[in-house]
Image (cartoon, helix red, strand yellow):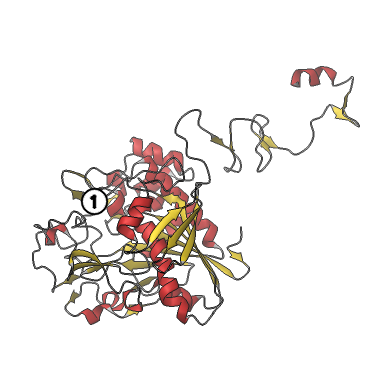
């Protein structure tokens, strides 16, 4: 399918699929913060991201976001050991090599480098259940690929990208942060080990001219603010109202990560159909959708030179994992068996923790449309895209057509490509043994009876 519908540009945003969130790189209390990337659900998620990326590869455009915090970010537990706020602080995660010297001076974390590195050869055992799961899901994987000496670093995109041929190319390119592939605060591109002493260092954003149809966006780079959204900084730490609070100017160009500016500059004459997936569905993915819509409607649309530009947002269950309820101890990412924004996976969290005061979110009965209502009674909608293959809770597992890999079936003919598994070939012709008005011939009577 083409990525253009008229003059509409299809944009895919893959949010924070990083080793820190998938590889047990850090802990909160006695238990794991998120599950191991060897879990079958996260392997499926990465496989689906590969499929979504291929849909956008030819004519669309993809943004891979990465959390990229300073070593002593003000939200980290190492900087706020006595903070009683249950929403924060976070464990150390996705740390880069720069630091903020105006933050809490307490530096009681393990090291001043990105998370300790391991290699695929170390963490991936051919005989393990993890190896079996990966091989079963990434059919194209070559066993020899697991022996590459690839360093697994917490703030990098998931090492599982190595097992998808197209994502592997992306991973190889984006692991090396450069000016031609990264949207970032300019000062930190010029000096990756910088010590930030002035907030003016955090203002100027670099916009790349990529040679390929994807870029990466580094977010969460500011010292006392955070961006769960790919579009803006919306959370403040150590504010006048308390430790953790919504930023008063969250909907302004000053709070922008630079993503809207980049898209409007790169595709000045296009409408946008934006699909968002990644980690995790009921935190950073939904933040990216809701904040992206509100940044567009309140900040960029009023000043857009293309006055009739249409922008559509899609929340994709494909390529997305969730965490049940709020963040806490022993959390495993999951994929809900039904494509619904239930109280556990969406509606309550969006209304209580994600949207600013006065805004409300509802989903329609089938959870195909989400609606944000503003304090001024304006309604903004986005699409909720279901899994392409239904998630099953029990019973006989659907198989996929061995040829086109699309149609789920229990047996018989694939309605997509016409393949008949028990014949081992594709056919759209009528069975032999009939002619004219469909009467049986004497020659084929016996064979036709057996078929019947």
The correct choice, above or below, for 358 with respect to 417 in the image is below
Question: From the viewer's perspective, is residue 75 above or below residue 142?
Answer: below
Q: Seen in the image, is 33 located left or right of residue 77? A: right
The quarter of the displayed image where residue 184 is located: bottom left
Q: Residue at position x 61%, y 61% from top? A: 2
- The residue that disc 1 covers is 25
Left or right: residue 177 versus residue 417 is left
Quarter of the image with the N terminus is bottom right
**SS for tag 1?**
loop
Can residue 397 be seen in this snapshot?
A: yes
Q: Quadrant of the C terminus?
A: top right
Give the camera-side residue of 452 and 446.
452
In the image, taking residue 34 as reference, residue 106 lies left or right, namely left
Expressed as whole percent of the image width and height from the top left, the position of residue 310 reads 54, 70
Judging depth in this view, the residue of 73 and 19 nearest the camera is: 73
Viewer-side residue, 52 vs 235: 235
Which residue is at 24% across, 80% downward? 201
* Residue at the outermost right position: 436
Q: How many marks?
A: 1
Percent coordinates x, y for residue 252 in the rendering? 35, 76
Percent from the top left, x then y, of residue 159?
35, 52
């Amino acid at each position: 399918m083409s990525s253009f519908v008229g003059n509409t540009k299809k944009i895919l945003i893959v949010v924070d699929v990083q080793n820190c969130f998938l590889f047990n790189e850090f802990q909160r209390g006695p238990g794991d913060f998120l599950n191991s990337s060897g879990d079958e659900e996260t392997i499926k998620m990465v496989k689906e991201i590969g499929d979504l990326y291929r849909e956008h590869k030819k004519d669309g455009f993809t943004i891979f976001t990465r959390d990229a915090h300073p070593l002593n970010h003000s939200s980290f537990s190492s900087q706020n050991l006595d903070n009683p706020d249950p929403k924060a602080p976070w464990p150390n995660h996705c740390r880069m090599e720069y630091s903020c010297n105006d933050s809490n001076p307490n530096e009681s974390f393990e090291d001043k480098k990105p998370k300790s590195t391991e290699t695929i050869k170390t963490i991936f055992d051919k005989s393990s259940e993890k190896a079996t799961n990966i091989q079963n899901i990434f059919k194209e994987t070559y066993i020899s690929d697991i022996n590459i000496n690839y360093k697994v670093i917490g703030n990098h995109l998931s090492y599982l990208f190595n097992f998808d041929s197209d994502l592997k190319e992306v991973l190889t390119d984006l692991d090396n942060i450069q000016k031609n592939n990264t949207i970032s605060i300019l000062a930190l591109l010029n000096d990756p080990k910088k010590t930030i002493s002035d907030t003016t260092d955090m203002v100027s954003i670099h916009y790349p001219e990529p040679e390929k149809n994807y870029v990466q966006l580094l977010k969460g780079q500011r010292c006392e603010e955070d961006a769960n959204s790919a579009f803006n900084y919306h959370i403040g730490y150590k504010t006048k109202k308390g430790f953790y609070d919504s930023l008063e100017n969250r909907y302004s160009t000053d709070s922008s990560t630079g993503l809207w500016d980049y898209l409007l500059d790169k595709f000045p004459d296009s409408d946008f159909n934006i699909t968002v997936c990644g980690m995790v569905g009921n935190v950073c993915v939904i933040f990216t959708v809701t904040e992206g819509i509100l940044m567009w409607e309140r900040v960029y649309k009023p000043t857009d030179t293309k006055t009739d530009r249409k922008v559509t947002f899609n929340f994709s269950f494909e390529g997305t994992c969730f965490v049940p309820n709020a963040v806490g101890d022993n959390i495993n990412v999951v994929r809900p068996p039904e494509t619904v924004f239930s109280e556990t996976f969406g509606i309550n969290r969006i209304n209580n923790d994600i949207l600013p005061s006065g805004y409300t979110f509802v989903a329609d009965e089938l959870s195909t449309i989400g609606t944000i209502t503003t304090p001024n009674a304006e309604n903004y909608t986005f699409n909720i895209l279901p899994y392409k293959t239904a998630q099953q809770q029990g019973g006989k597992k659907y198989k996929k057509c061995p040829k086109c890999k699309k149609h789920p079936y229990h047996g018989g003919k694939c309605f997509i490509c016409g393949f008949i598994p028990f014949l081992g070939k594709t056919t759209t012709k009528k069975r032999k043994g009939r002619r004219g008005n469909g009467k049986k011939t004497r020659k084929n009577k016996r064979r036709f009876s057996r078929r019947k």
